[in-house]
Amino acid sequence: MDDTNPTARALRCLALLQEQPGISASRLAAGLEVSERAARRYVAVLREAGVPVESARGPYGGYRLGRGVRLPPLLFDPAEALGLVMAVLDGHHDPDDPTDPVGSALGKLLRALPQPVAAQADVLRRGASAAPDRAAARPDPATAAALVAAAAQRRVVALDYCSEAGNRWTAEVEPWAVVVRHARWYLLCRSPSRDAVRAYRVDRIEAVEPREGSFVPPPELDPVALLEQHLASGWEYAAEVVVDAPLETVARRLRPGLGRLEAVDEHTTRLVGSTSNPWWYAEQLVVLPAAYRILGGPELLHCARATGERLLAATEPTVDGAAESR
């Protein structure tokens, strides 16, 4: 550690006190990479700055941050700070796991709060149970932060992407916004080479590299609305479906991200989109309350046919008349 930066060492001392309540002078000195005498001097610096540091003698003694009206400042590392923001947005972290960035940051908060408040919060943390969302896909915090920063700075980036089908490619894009939708994180962006808007899953972005170029996003950009429009554009497998039902009926039954709906006439609707998972797409169409015809592409036709055969097979009786178990 740099001996010429006493402020940094004092902040590190504060962090150690937050992370290890009751830390001994020898462990504090080891963490600061100084002598025990120097470690006690940094404790004195914190006290002079108004940070309540308590000490106790004896074999079970040590230093800890005191509780009271004046709370010590909290020091979060980048993963914890990003994790807290992401936890607020998606709500799918384990608050009682000290190895999780959110659990670690929450532990620091509880140690800094006055005892009555901390006790209630700790009961809630340990006693509440959250049902896991199987559709949730939490991205790497550093990747999400890099994309948000690039969007804020209006800086072009290159992405290394892996689709759900396992295909990999690199794309240079203008990152317009990061949007959280149904516990999944998306990058809404524009591909200059294709002059097209794209929506990429942030958890499938494997690398982000800033480029020199800059951009200006569209005026009055509505990221959420625009994301809904483009979730089904630009993927590997095309989808075109004609449904024998009015547009309003189809729109009520299908997920918004499946593609663009067009009214052919008052009784017929066309769905145009694309997907990285034609099996999943075919299964979404089953909920339609009317007859429909898949015009393309070939992968979706194959998956829809196989899905239909599986559903038909589930209705066939066995030799003894009982429904076949599948």
Image (cartoon, helix red, strand yellow):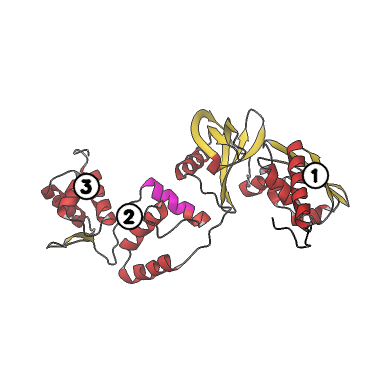
Tell me the element at label 2: loop
Q: Residue at x 35, y 67 (%)?
A: 118
Q: How many marks?
A: 3
Give the amino acid at mark 3.
Gly
Residue, disc 3: 31
Q: CA distance from mark 2 to mark 3?
A: 18 Å
Q: CA distance from mark 2 to mark 1?
A: 55 Å
Q: Quadrant of the C terminus?
A: bottom right
Q: Residue at x 60, y 38 (%)?
A: 163
Q: Quadrant of the N terminus?
A: top left
Farthest residue, direction front? 320
| Residue 42 seen in the current view | no
**Which of the labelled discs sits on residue 74, or is there none?**
2
Say if mark 2 contacts mark 3, CB within 8 Å.
no
Residue, disc 1: 241
Say if mark 2 contacts mark 1, CB within 8 Å.
no
Tell which circle, 2 or 3, labels the residue nearer the N-terminal end.
Answer: 3
Q: Residue at x 50, y 56 (%)?
A: 92
Give the amino acid at mark 2.
Leu
In the rendered image, residue 283 lying in the magenta stretch gets the answer no
Q: Residue at x 66, y 44 (%)?
A: 231
Q: CA distance from mark 1 to mark 3?
A: 64 Å
> In x, y percent, where is residue 80?
39, 50
The secondary structure that dominates the magenta segment is helix
10 Å neighbourhood of mark 3: few (<14), some, or many (≥20)? some
> In x, y percent, where is residue 192?
62, 30
